[in-house]
Image (cartoon, helix red, strand yellow):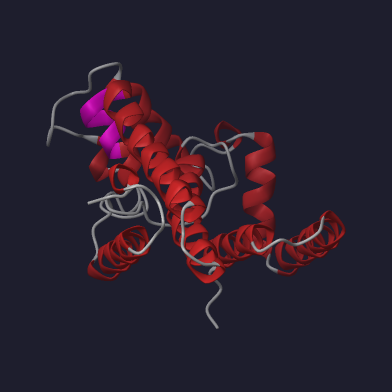
Amino acid sequence: MQPDFSTVVILVLTATTMLFAAGASMRQMIILLGVGLLATYVMIRVAAYRNDRLTLWLMGPFSDPTGEGMQLVQSLVALNRGGWFGVGLGQSQQKFNVYAPHTDGIFSIVCEELGILGALAIVGLYGLWTWRGLRIAWHARDVYGRILAVGLTTWVTFQAAVHIGVLTATVPFTGTVLPFVSYGGSSLSSSILSAGLLLSISRDSGAPEEEQIA
């Protein structure tokens, strides 16, 4: 019931991926894509702030650096200050300027403190999560386990992708946490629950023992 468009997008992307994994035909996927794009357009147009964010993304945050684009500009400043090796853990100055630096803006602070190398390490860990999760899905004992594993894996991956995309100005500005990194009990609990369920699917799978996560 809340106007949380980013969560809707993540849930729809996750459900669509699960539908594809369940064996949906290309015709069904194309119809779903068309309906999704139309629904997205309508949801953006009916809310002025969403329309403004889309316009800002198309024009670039520096088109309004002291207004609508200020938060994104501050995020990009944090990314730039980090350089290759960062300013040092706990030494961020942009955490006083970036919106919600402990949750929605955490990736910017990580980049500032740990640099490009630290950011690449985090992205690499999400890549590892995706690879291992899909491998668990491939070796799942039944269809239910496969689809569940795909959903759990992509749910975390899409959250991370949207979070990083927003703070690097790759996608329109919205708010979402970075799984396993952002502060917050509910976010961490749900991420750990996802990992636990994946471990359970892996344990019961038909994969060779050396291929299972222990």
Q: Is residue 165 above or below residue 203?
A: above
Q: Give the residue drawn at x 29%, y 16%.
A: 84
Question: Horizontal and vertical percent for residue 95?
Answer: 24, 42
Question: Horizontal and vertical percent for residue 105?
Answer: 35, 47
Left or right, residue 35 beside residue 128: right
Q: Nearer the viewer, residue 77 or 121?
A: 121
Q: Give the residue drawn at x 79%, y 63%.
A: 32
Quarter of the view holding residue 132: top left
Residue numbers of the magenta segment: 109-115
Q: Is residue 90 above or below residue 130?
A: above
Decide whether residue 47 is among the magenta residues: no
Q: Give the residue drawn at x 68%, y 35%.
A: 59
Question: Horizontal and vertical percent for residue 37?
Answer: 78, 58
Q: Nearer the viewer, residue 107 or 44?
A: 107
Q: Is residue 179 above or below residue 89?
A: below
Q: Nearer the viewer, residue 112 or 198?
A: 198
Q: For the view shown, which residue lies furthest in the top direction?
A: 84
Q: Nearer the viewer, residue 69 or 151?
A: 151
In what quadrant of the picture does the N terminus appear? Answer: bottom right
Left or right, residue 126 beside residue 181: right
